[in-house]
Image (tube, rainbow, N blue to C red):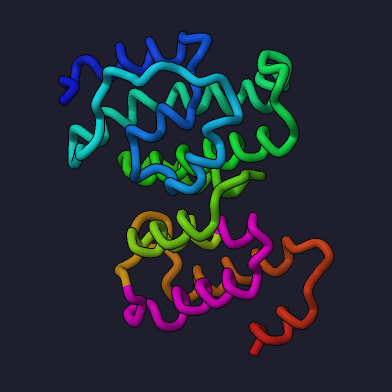
Amino acid sequence: MLKSHKYEEAMYNLASSDYCNPAQVLELFPDLAPKSLIIAARGASHTSNQSSANLENLSGDELQKAVAALMPYLLSYRNRIASGEIAIQCKHINEKSIESLSTLIDTAIVNGLLILPDNGALLQFLERANSVHFDFTSLKLERAGRYAELVALLKSSGRHRDAMQVLQKLSVSFDDLKNPPVGAAMELRGLPGAWAAIKYLTSLTPLDFDLVATHSK
């Protein structure tokens, strides 16, 4: 098991390697992305030798330390994808491979932020355009009671009816939710939830009149 003071050193070594593949890095963090996504992205970049860092089976504070050390690498790689650097650096890479890497990185960032203490960064990330793997992430958000973040993910995925159903539960049946709301969702009980629903509906372009009619009753 890697000692906590070595996490940052290990992530630095991985990030600085010309042969570093984020899929291989994320094999060490099974809570951050589904195995199928890691396998799909594994061949999308350079491969490297097996890492000597063993970060599996971590929990609690140790897991948070490892994820905190990993996060700058993930954010940097995301920027490199967005800037086109990865496509230029990896001559063999194609558009499908870039999409696989984008989904892997965004999914890992979101699920990493879910493990770290809540500072609002998770909600802000999901409110922007992203490539997060929906099925894997939505389940984790719901289990964690992060309903505000779940609504943001539903919206970015175009699942507006599902998002409105979540907002409706938060505003009128707060105590009946399967998992207790955590973070920003705790502020959506009653009228704040209703206003959040109105804001959501009016932000849709084009306006979904059927959805407005359903939730204006």
Rendered residue at 67%/17% (across/down) = 90
Q: Is residue 149 left or right of residue 206?
A: left
Which stretch did the figure color magenta? Answer: 152-178
Relative placement, left or right, of 74 versus 93 is left
In this view, the residue in front, 133 or 168, is 133
Question: Which part of the image, by quadrant, shows the C terminus?
Answer: bottom right
Which x, y percent locates residue 110? 46, 43
Q: Is residue 154 magenta?
A: yes
Point out residue 60 in the picture as x, y percentages from the top left corner: 18, 41
* Rendered location of residue 49, percent (x, y): 40, 16
State left or right for residue 198 relative to residue 176.
right
Pick whichever, 116 or 35, lies toward us.
35
Picture quarter containing residue 93? top right
Q: Which quadrant of the view contains residue 98? A: top right
Looking at the image, which residue is at 38% across and 35% down?
27
Q: Residue at x 52, y 78 (%)?
A: 168
- Against 92, residue 89 (above or below) is above
Dividing the picture into quadrants, the one containing residue 175 is bottom left
Q: Nearer the viewer, residue 209 or 139?
A: 139
